[in-house]
Image (cartoon, rainbow, N blue to C red):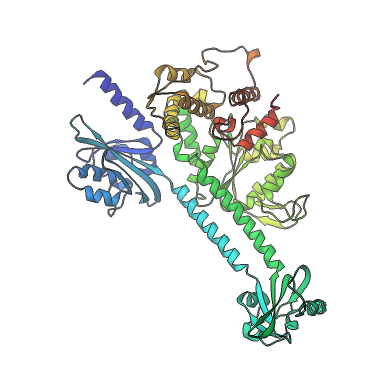
Amino acid sequence: MNKNLLNENLFVEHLLQNMPVSAFVLNAQHQVIIWNQACEQLTGINAAQMIGTNQHWQGFYTEQRPCLADLLLNSSLGDVDRLYEQASAFNSSNNVCHTENWCLMPDGRRLYLVIDAGTICNAQGEIVAVVETQRDRTEQRLTMQALFESEQRISSILASAMDAIITVDYHQNITLFNAAAVRIFRCAADFAIGQSVERFIAPSCAKLFKQFISFDNNQTWLPEGLSARRADGEEFPIEATFSPLEANGQKLYTIILRDVNDRRIAEQQLDRLQQEKGYLQEVINDEHNPSDFVSGSKIMRTVLEQVRMVARTDTPVLLLGETGTGKELLARAIHEFSDRSASIMVKVNCAVLPAELIESELFGHEKGAFTGATQQRKGRFELAHGGSLFLDEIGELSLSAQTKLLRVLQEQEFERVGGSETIKVDVRVIAATNRNLLEEVNVGRFRSDLYYRLNVFPVQVPALRQRVEDIPLLAYFFLPRYAKKFGKQLKRIDAASLEQLKQYAWPGNVRELQNVIERAVILSQGEVLEIEPLLSSRSVSPAPSQLKTLEVVEREHILRTLEETAWVISGLKGAAAILGMNANTLRSRMLKLGISKK
């Protein structure tokens, strides 16, 4: 066999084995010849059990749903019609098909998988093998379902918050009592019709009501100051509109009123649902998916094993590591692997929120708790009830917020800002920081008892320079993503550029590598990605006096990016997009680092 062809085959097999997406390869006899590591993790079936067999369908399908890879092989034998039936998208010109469905795993789990299959042909155009990939999108599917249900609940609340409509005749006797009035006044329409409207007016407001129920007046709206009376005698505040009308020659008067208490409750429920919808939308739009974690290094395998072990417990987890190492991705993996995966994971970036608002964000506030608190608001802990709360940059929390957080961790209860009601929650806390919390404890900026409560299960996330073997895998992972995004036909990375990536120190870690690949894709032409010379090299070791703090490196990196974008922060080509962060987050970091345009 040609040596170059052999090397290419080995390289392709290595990529398939180490790619983060579940994949297997069938030969023309429908036998498994490759069953990669991600496929083992997804199905729980070892490659040794599958290689050489035709039992691959057990990993993903019931007997009622045939394997796309098998159908592609069969399509050359005349089974094209069945392929069109089973695949939601099929390109007959190159035999590539796509589908997505709920699939049954060997251990009984139901996962929503996005499945793609394509053929490998020899020089004569004969199909010699088929590659099939499976991406787990169960979390997004469940999140979309929860989002839909959230929107349905919002619609139900709006539909139920209908006004009571009461019509009275010239003698002020009730002639119409709609369904909302039945609900608000707690009596049947048959009971109300024919009675004097005074029966449902608070005695203190009777005289005022009679002044407005006058056929000499025009339409009048009273937003406050009135009270009505239910059938059981309970009085309640209302806002009302009074309108004279004439029907069939008969003079009538219509009162449209609303229970102000009902409206307040509905507003509170709607506020919570809108917040919940916002977090669900964030999860759907998040590019980061735990199944996309790319690594072939021993040090990261150890970290992922720790994550899997702790995920099934409710123990707090503390993720430690430099900025850009993937701590949020690991937090999502802990949530996904846990028994709470059916609920949402709510994220709080403690570095972005001002110190005076962080407690309100975490624990909520009561109306009037502070200037601008015009209504009661639930915090992130209440939204995360039953799920997980990810506290990113926890080292930025104020001492007062740390005190409340410690109580929630110990007792699973708290009070809203400005409130006295104790609220019970069931929340699993995952925290992350790039600070040395023990040093923060020693200088009095972080509570020691909270540190030891969070430090039950610390996970040290290695910097990219500590796992050099992952750099090519990550580069090739980001390449097709940005090639597709910018409409480029890039297939591979220039060898010298790849070596340069391995030699660079990566102070910004994976996030910086992602930004470098994105920039290079924008600038590159043809099929080979070439990367401009990077600023530092791993082969040059600076003297201790020349070493820079992470904050200085971050400041310089942000400044360079801003200068290259002419200080444009937002937008597709703005600094925030290039740095891989939200525009508001970038502005917050600029403020903290003292960066401003001269």
Q: Let me know if residue 460 appears in the view.
A: no
- Which of the 4 quarters of the picture holds residue 480? top left
Direction from residue 252 to residue 83 in the image, left or right: left
- Between 29 and 48, the one lying in front of the other is 29
Q: Residue furthest front?
A: 249
Q: Quadrant of the C terminus?
A: top right
| Residue positioned 75% across, 80% down in the render | 215
| Residue positioned 64% across, 19% down in the render | 548
x, y percentage for residue 486? 45, 32
x, y percentage for residue 5? 26, 22
Question: 488 above or below 497?
Answer: below
Q: Let me know if residue 495 appears in the view.
A: yes
Count the marks: how many?
Answer: 0
x, y percentage for residue 237? 75, 70
x, y percentage for residue 81? 23, 50
- Which of the 4 quarters of the picture holds residue 546? top right
- Which of the 4 quarters of the picture holds residue 1? top left
